[in-house]
């Protein structure tokens, strides 16, 4: 079965908005919601994503990611660490390489289902405010270039409809 778009969908506000935008543009039967189970602290988001995908009548796919060495230093993955945000420093909830890994893991799936785009709910302002370096359009453009080469499709794109927005 072919899809026009894959949405990286955690079940949070940003990715769910991306899901709604993609479903509106391409139709719910042409959008695939993809989530990742990586021992994240807030796995309840995955349950929310399942509910939201059903509400939009969008097919859902979960990818299991085994423990990644180094990720345990993030409070997003390690529930024993308190979440800390210090001015001028990257918060300890940052998971090194997460957005890039998610996009790279979704790339072969795009080829398998004939999708030409992946939606991801990153925000540059969030990156500036929180210190997450993988939320900028510049970062996404770099990953997009690699994926285009990997899947041999110059028409492939990573859609970031929220990139210049704020949470408000």
Image (cartoon, helix red, strand yellow):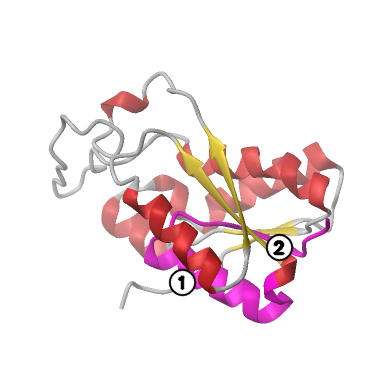
Is 122 on the left-hand or right-hand side of 102?
A: left
Badge 2 element: strand
- Tell me which residue sits at (46%, 71%) in the image: 164
Q: Give percent across and percent down for residue 55.
A: 52, 73
Magenta range is 1-28
Is 113 on the left-hand or right-hand side of 7?
A: right
Q: Which residue is mark 2?
A: 5
> Which of marks 2 and 1 precedes in the sequence?
2
Single out the mark in the foreground, 1 or 2.
2
User: Quarter holding the N terminus?
Assistant: bottom right
Measured along the vertical axis of the image, is residue 160 above or below residue 34? below
Queried whether the magenta region covers residue 26, the answer comes back as yes
Q: Which one is nearer the viewer's eye here, 27 or 164? A: 27
Measured along the vertical axis of the image, is residue 14 above or below residue 142? below
Q: Are marks 1 and 2 in contact (CB under 8 Å)?
A: no
User: Quarter holding the C terminus?
Assistant: bottom left
Q: Give percent across and percent down for residue 8.
A: 55, 54
Mark 1 Cα-neighbour bin, 10 Å: few <14, some 14–19, many ≥20: few
Is 98 on the left-hand or right-hand side of 74?
A: right
- Tell me which residue sits at (46%, 47%) in the image: 134
- Give the number of the disc on residue 122: none
- Tell me which residue sits at (23%, 43%) in the image: 91
Quarter assignment of residue 77: top left
- Tell me which residue sits at (49%, 62%) in the image: 121
Q: Which residue is mark 1?
A: 164
Q: Is residue 13 visible?
A: yes
């Amino acid at each position: 079965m072919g899809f026009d778009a894959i949405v990286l969908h955690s079940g949070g506000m940003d990715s769910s908005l991306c899901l709604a935008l993609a479903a509106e543009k391409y139709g719910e039967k042409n959008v695939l919601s993809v989530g990742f189970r990586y021992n994240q602290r807030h796995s309840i988001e995955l349950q929310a994503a399942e509910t939201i995908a059903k509400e939009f009548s969008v097919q859902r796919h979960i990818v299991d990611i085994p423990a990644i060495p180094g990720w345990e230093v993030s409070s997003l993955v390690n529930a024993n660490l308190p979440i800390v945000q210090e001015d001028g420093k990257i918060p300890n909830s940052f998971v090194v390489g997460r957005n890039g890994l998610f996009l790279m893991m979704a790339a072969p799936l795009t080829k398998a289902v004939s999708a030409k785009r992946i939606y991801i709910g990153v925000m540059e302002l969030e990156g500036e405010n929180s210190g997450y370096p993988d939320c900028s359009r510049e970062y996404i453009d770099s990953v997009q270039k690699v994926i285009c080469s990997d899947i041999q499709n110059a028409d492939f794109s990573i859609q970031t409809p929220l990139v210049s927005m704020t949470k408000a």
